[in-house]
Image (tube, rainbow, N blue to C red):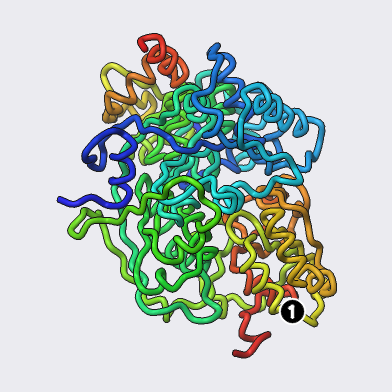
Amino acid sequence: MGMTITEKIIADHSGLKEVHPGQFVYADVDICLGNDITAPIAIEEFEKAGISKVFDPEKIVLVPDHFTPNKDIKSAQQSKSLRVFAEKHHLKHYFEIGRMGIEHALLPEKGIVGPGDLVIGADSHTCTYGALGAFSTGVGSTDLAACFATGKVWLRVPESIRFVFHGKAKSWTSGKDLILYTIGTIGVDGALYKAMEFEGSAISNLPMDDRFAMCNMAIEAGAKSGIIAPDKNTEEYIKGRFKRKPVMYHSDPGCNYVRTYEFNADKITPQVALPSLPENTKPVEEVSGIKIDQIVIGSCTNGRISDLRIAAGILKGKKVHPSIRLIIFPATQEIYKKALQEGLIETFIDAEAVVSTPTCGPCLGGHMGILAEGERALSTTNRNFVGRMGHPKSEIYLCSPAVAAASAITGMITPPDEIIKN
Amino acid sequence: MKGKCWKFGNNINTDEIIPARYLNTTDVKELASHCMEDADPNFMKKIKVDDIIVAGDNFGCGSSREHAPIAIKAAKISCVIAKSFARIFFRNAINIGLPIFECPDAAEQIREGDEIEVNLTAGEILDHTLKKRFRFEPFPKEMQEIIQVGGLMNFVKKKMAVG
């Protein structure tokens, strides 16, 4: 029987001709990643074990992006531990602020990860790189410490679920809407332990930024990974960025999926996930009119240049509603600069939005936009759990950049086509 | 493992187990002091050493923060029983040596406050209050190897020593 793209990547990284779901392997890792929350524990564990050398200083990436620029003394200590470790072990990929970006936007942009890679990261949204045709999964700090030492990770080969998106997504329907719709259909544990493989004509037509957003949220369905087979869009994206030789894997005909879902992308309208689980999705038109206090556009899900272009296109020449605080986070310095050059930042400032340096800050209730008791946020981030962005009695609605920008103008959840008629 | 049951529902996520506002430390005692805070603000005041958490589906979903199983372990909870676990929480628990058991029947039937005992060798969960036994499947041998040596770093050290 043929193998899925996920099985092929895992087999090749484990020195095996083939692997089967449920099988345990110790796989070689191309890139491992930690941030200012997860890496400090990994560093402690690595040092406690008395291991003196990392397996490969070119394959470890440390990105202090969560509480940076350091929000308090304790966070500063954590960031410092990354810096000291990176210097001590001569790590090639350590990103100080000024060069730093939100990790899952930064690594693809810098060409550190690419097609065919096996990547682990001590951050649950590491599944983002599946958009490049890589097997990429979130792990914990101890896994990262073990990988620092050995360059390997223990894995149970996941079963794959296939999601076929027929047709073509409509103009206001983004990758974020396709994935919210998917999670709404299968639930927050609908893909538990499994690989989500996205395909179909709507995916072929989907720009890379939208593919990143889709794979990014595979974890919100409980998945181990999300993956899209590489194609012309992928090749175009990695050109000039990815310096290693990409390996373009594809699933074999007749490979084994535990389940196939088929969706018609033409019928999927912009989605909103209601508090307090990403599975509580509804078409935006069914929830329009809900009053909002704060809107966040950014994060590893939706802080890329095309997200900012969509938001600016809606906000151009308009003002943010007086009752709304709109916070916009370009995900990396490169995206920030591009947004500046294209005049997007000026559009945001003229609209009376706040534009911030890249950071994960508000997405996880870290800093730079915490919610008070009883406040309601509409956000392009990935989780709307209780207390995620601040007070345990605050609420979060998740959506695409287009819905967020449209709602910023009216002060309430608003379908984008009510602001801009196509 | 023997203790009183504290019951939680489905999809208890890592933001509830240890909110991100406390992730600017790796001090295990400090993390423990906020264990389960956004799911039950009084949790740490109520529990005693060796008590057991029993939860529904997808326990520990959300972020990869190992601080979540660390906080539970440091709060001296002896083990977690659930219908199912989110995968990163699952591997983190194995890697740091927090005992966890997947047993849908037990998770369904055990009530808050019941006295529970887990017999590892027999593969049984006993509810002394209900006077009921539940069987659970042992973990695959590859995971047991990690558990038996006290976690992933010990496992790695052993492997590296062997060469």
| Residue closest to the far top | B161
Q: Is residue A378 above or below residue B5?
A: below
**Is residue A393 visible to us here?**
no
Local SS, label 1: helix
Q: Residues within 10 Å of mark 1 (few under 14, many from 20)?
A: some
- Residue visible at 36% across and 21% down in the picture: B118
Residue A108 placement (x, y as % from top left): 55, 52
Q: Is residue A299 above or below residue B30?
A: below
Q: Amino acid at mark 1?
A: Thr
Residue A22 placement (x, y as % from top left): 26, 39
Q: Name the foreground residue: A374 vs A350.
A: A350
Question: Which residue was labeled with disc 1?
Answer: A410
Q: Is residue A79 left or right of residue A250?
A: right
Q: Is residue B92 left or right of residue A155?
A: right
- Residue visible at 29% across and 48% down in the picture: A159
Q: Is residue B40 left or right of residue A350?
A: left
Residue A329 placement (x, y as % from top left): 72, 58
Q: Is residue A239 left or right of residue A168?
A: right
Q: Quadrant of the C terminus of chain A?
A: bottom right
- Residue visible at 31% across and 60% down in the picture: A162
